[in-house]
Image (spheres, grey):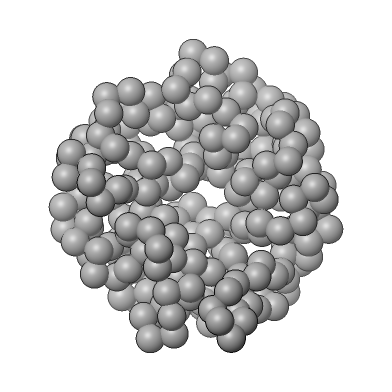
């Protein structure tokens, strides 16, 4: 028997709204109680001030399950991001690495991950960003694993093309490295341009993807992400939640 995958929402969906009280209320408005918090809504450089952010979400009944997406360059101040995650009780940070700094960054991130007991999932951000391609991801896993693994963004995974960008196959291939999911969906035009749609109504085979996660025993962080309708995202996100419950869980 399959078990539901608990999921929340990425705070980037609410980037038009700047206060955490507003964002927390909108999380509840769409029927969820978990969030991955991005840098639009908190300064992860200031752990001493992060307690107030955590308390805002706690009062609203919303758990901060992850931070990100954070770009690691290997600077010492980036340890603060782990301290903030720990204050929230989060066990995951979504991450990017850069081609010019990853050799410096990966060992530091791995050490911080070990120190705080927080896993790091490389967010695959399509074909135009370092870490979007399978061969690059596999090399980064070899350098930073098991502390550094993968956060599959389903839409950006598909953006690299139908031969390599197969979310279901990525789950099967990278299961032991899989620490996070961004449930996101695109439709593509003839020229390759993408457009956000409600999760499960675009190119993503949502039932097959979720089935693969369940079969792989996925136990990581999961959030939905819808980047359109910036000024009024609640209606579409509510549809995303309903689609997830109808088609995936």
User: Image height check: is 52 above or below 41?
Assistant: above
In the picture provided, is 25 more to the left or to the right than 82? Answer: right
Residue 17 drawn above or below residue 180: above
Q: Where's residue 216, x and y in %? A: 39, 71
**Residue 121 to residue 44: above or below:** below
Question: In which image quadrant can residue 23 be found?
Answer: top right
Quarter placement of the C terminus: bottom right
Rendered view: 81 above or below 190: above
Among the 4 quarters of the image, the one containing residue 229: bottom right
* Image point (83%, 58%), residue name: 235
Residue 184 is drawn in which quadrant?
bottom right
The reply to whether residue 92 is in sight is no
Q: Is residue 226 visible?
A: yes
Task: Give the residue at x 53% y 25%.
Answer: 43
Foreground residue, 228 or 242? 228
| Quadrant of the frame with the N terminus | bottom right
x 60%, y 79%: residue: 188
Residue 165 x %, y %: 41, 77
In the rendered structure, the answer to whether residue 204 lies left or right of residue 214 reads right
Residue 195 horizontal/vertical position (percent):
65, 70
């Amino acid at each position: 028997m399959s078990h539901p995958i608990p999921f929340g929402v990425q705070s980037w969906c609410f980037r038009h709204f700047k206060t955490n009280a507003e964002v927390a209320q909108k999380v509840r408005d769409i029927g969820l109680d978990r969030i991955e918090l991005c840098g639009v809504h908190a300064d992860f450089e200031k752990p001493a001030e992060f307690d107030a952010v955590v308390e805002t979400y706690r009062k609203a009944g919303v758990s901060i399950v992850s931070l990100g997406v954070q770009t690691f360059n290997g600077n010492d101040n980036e340890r603060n991001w782990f301290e903030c995650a720990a204050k929230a009780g989060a066990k995951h940070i979504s991450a990017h690495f850069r081609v010019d700094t990853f050799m410096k960054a990966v060992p530091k991130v791995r050490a911080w991950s070990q120190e705080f007991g927080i896993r790091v999932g490389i967010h695959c951000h399509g074909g135009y960003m370092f870490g979007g391609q399978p061969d690059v991801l596999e090399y980064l896993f070899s350098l930073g694993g098991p502390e550094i693994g993968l956060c599959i963004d389903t839409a950006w995974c598909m953006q690299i093309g139908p031969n390599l960008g197969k979310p279901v196959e990525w789950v099967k291939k990278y299961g032991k490295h899989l620490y996070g999911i961004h449930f996101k969906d695109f439709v593509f035009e003839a020229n390759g341009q993408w457009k956000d749609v409600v999760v499960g109504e675009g190119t993503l085979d949502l039932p097959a993807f979720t089935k693969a996660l369940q079969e792989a025993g996925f136990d990581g962080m999961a959030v939905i992400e819808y980047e359109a309708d910036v000024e009024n995202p609640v209606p579409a996100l509510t549809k995303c939640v309903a689609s997830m419950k109808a088609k995936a869980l």
